[in-house]
Image (cartoon, rainbow, N blue to C red):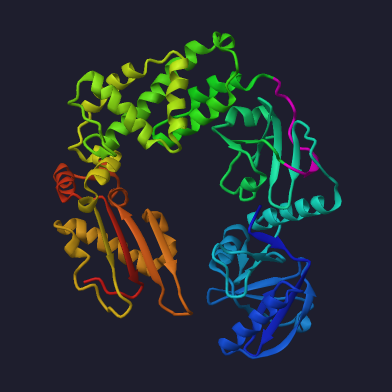
Amino acid sequence: MTQYRLQTDITYYVTDNHGILFIEPGRKMLANKASSVLFRLGYKTVKSGTIRTGQEFEIEFRNNKIWVKHPKLMGGKDYFEVLDQIDDNMREIVQNIDIIDHKPKAKFELLTFEPEYGSSVGYHPYFACSGMKSYDEAWDEFVRAVNIQRKPRTKKVTLGHRYDTQECTLWYLGDFGGTPGFVSSKGNATKISEIMTGLRRALKINKTTDIKCYSGYSESDLLLIKHPGLMTDSGQDLDSDWSEPIYKFWTSWICSEKLENRRDYLKLYDLMSLTHPDSLIEWSSWEPTVKPALKKFLKNYLLQIFIDFESRDCCGHKLSVYLSDENLCKEAKDVYIYSWVGNRESAEGSLKFMANHGIDIDQAILETKIAFSQIDFGNLENLLKYHSRFLNINKNIYERSLTFSEDQKDDGGKIRGLFNNKTLSDTVVEMLNLAQENLGLVSNLFSYLGVYQYNGKSIPDLNIKLSLQDIVDYLGGIGSLSEAFKEVLISEKFLTLDITLKRNLVIL
């Protein structure tokens, strides 16, 4: 589903200073809210009504704002400034449509856009035309809604068909051990085999309510839904060219997937454990490829556990390279279970799954110990690569934060005071100044850059998360740094900064 909605009709309010506010028609609560917003902002409504939108809106940009005219709006001659508009709309238009003399060369349709945290009147107006991503998404959602209204619902599923509900769209891939398997996004795939070879995760869903919010699922997620409920069959949408057991695709998955952290390993385990065949006899043809790959992925996972938990107390378990081999294996398994994202039964099941595939868990742990002992945590490259270890062990040292009150005019030198090295502090100040001057336009420089404006105040708050990796990237990458400066960054014992400040705060 999408945040954008096509609107057959639209209600408008024209103000005395050539502003216009649009809302969905027939919603009394929105109408009351719109009137209240206009009154509070000091606008006087001189005309209101309802029009059919069509693709008849013309746009002109004035002072970084969208102005529109429509043949059925106040005689169709004048432009009006759109109230309650968002910057994303102008940005998408500029990126997709030719602009001549501040006017995009296209006719636009009015959509409504539901923002993440609501808006002043419920839904922002959003102008789009064919070829723009927002319009294409809104059109797909319109077709989906029509299908749901006009076609009967069914519990019967057919391979390759698309199924729609009020909450989501699903594509049926087949039966997996008695459970129907779906994806909630097919991407550009036209065949079931294309989706099968691209699967990276499986999720077992027992209640249909769990799939109402499916935006986090992609075409690489297999959804095993025990009781999908009534759905609208919208017809064949994928070629049914797949008839092999799902485990025949395991080799291509594990040979193409780069598993570098615990999250990747968890995804692969879920996928394989939920789709494995009942009989081990069928595995002989591909086990020589699968088994070493599984061991490699297990060792990568164990190495991350050593990095994050070695020398830390984990609910009475302490993983240490100085333990005997027997005790190390015991503690490593306990910490493995402790750190597992899920319950103990699931964690123990994953170890059993590996053992059933002929993998010696103890041997993998001892080999991982050797690999861990060879890591030099004293250089900048590994400080950045294994930052989780330093944050887990010494978070109070490596993580810094600052928040400035609303009435502060300058930072009092506190930002520079966080750092010992002048080059480092100058770089941080330079990046923060860029954020203040350009707001969201430089968000790519930071781990996070949020811009918040409360209660109509003209000066927004900035919440910024700045990492050492962000700084290194800003300076041209690790290869562009001198060895002396690398040593400075190591001795600084800094990895992340979380800071909240006003746009106009002066950094001394």
Question: Taking 235 as reference, is 290 left or right?
Answer: left
Q: Is residue 275 magenta?
A: no
Q: In terms of image quadrants, where is residue 178? A: top right
Percent of width and height locating residue 241: 73, 24
> Residue placed at 25% from the left, 24% from the top?
328
> Residue placed at 80% from the left, 51% from the top?
148
Question: Can you see residue 404?
Answer: yes
Bounds of the magenta segment = 229-243
Q: In terms of image quadrants, where is residue 49? A: bottom right
User: Magenta segment, principal secondary structure?
Assistant: loop
Percent of width and height locating residue 243: 71, 21
Q: In terms of image quadrants, where is residue 193? A: top right
Percent of width and height locating residue 116: 55, 62
Percent of width and height locating residue 142: 75, 56
Q: Is residue 489 above or below residue 176?
A: below
Q: Nearer the viewer, residue 142 or 88?
A: 142
Q: Is residue 231 magenta?
A: yes
